[in-house]
Amino acid sequence: MDKKLITIKEAAESLDLSPATIRRRIKIGQLKAEKIEGIYGPQWVIDPDNLTESSYNIEVIPVRHNLTPDKLEDIIKRATQEAIRAEINESMQDYAAQMQELKNTIKQLQKQLNEQPKESFLKRLFKG
C-alpha cells in the first residue's frame, strides 16, 4: 500500500517553517521530494518519513559584545549628525554655485543697461 504523501504546505506546517523554506530545502537537496502531476499541474510531494531527516537543529553561537543601548544610541546619533552635516555642506555648495551664477547674470544685465544710450526723461516720455 502506498504511503500518504504530503504537500509543501503540509510539510511547512508540520515543521513550523514557511513553504518557501521547504521549497529551498528541496532545491538544494536537503529534503527529498518528488514531482507528480497534480490536478493544477506539476507539484512537489514529500514522504512524511523524510521530514524527520530534514528537521535538523542548527547550533546557534551567541554573540557577545559590550554595546549597551546608550552606546548604540550615541553611535546612531553621531552617524546621523555626520550624515546631516554632509548633506548641509553639499546643499551650501549648491547654493553658493547658484548665487555665483545669479551674481554673474546681474553683472551682465547691469553692463547691458549701462551700454544703452541714455535719453533724457522728456524724450522718453514724449516718444511715440
Image: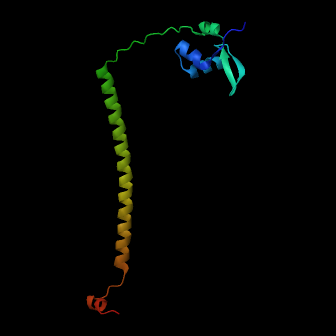
Q: Which residue appears farthest toward the left when viewing the image?
A: 122
Residue 14 image-quadrant placement: top right
- Give the residue drawn at x 62%, y 7%: 53
Q: Quadrant of the N terminus?
A: top right
| Image height of 116 relative to 6, above or below | below
Residue 39's quadrant in the figure?
top right
Which one is in front, 98 or 51?
51
**Residue 62 image position (x, y, % from top left):** 43, 10
Image position of 117 with respect to 112: above or below: below
In the displayed structure image, the side of residue 121 where residue 128 appears, left or right: right
Q: Position of residue 60 (x, y in %)?
A: 48, 10
Residue 25 lies in quadrant? top right
17 or 83: which is nearer to us?
17
At which x and y percent is residue 123? 30, 91
Who is closer to the viewer here, 121 or 60?
Answer: 60
Residue 122 horizontal/vertical position (percent): 26, 91
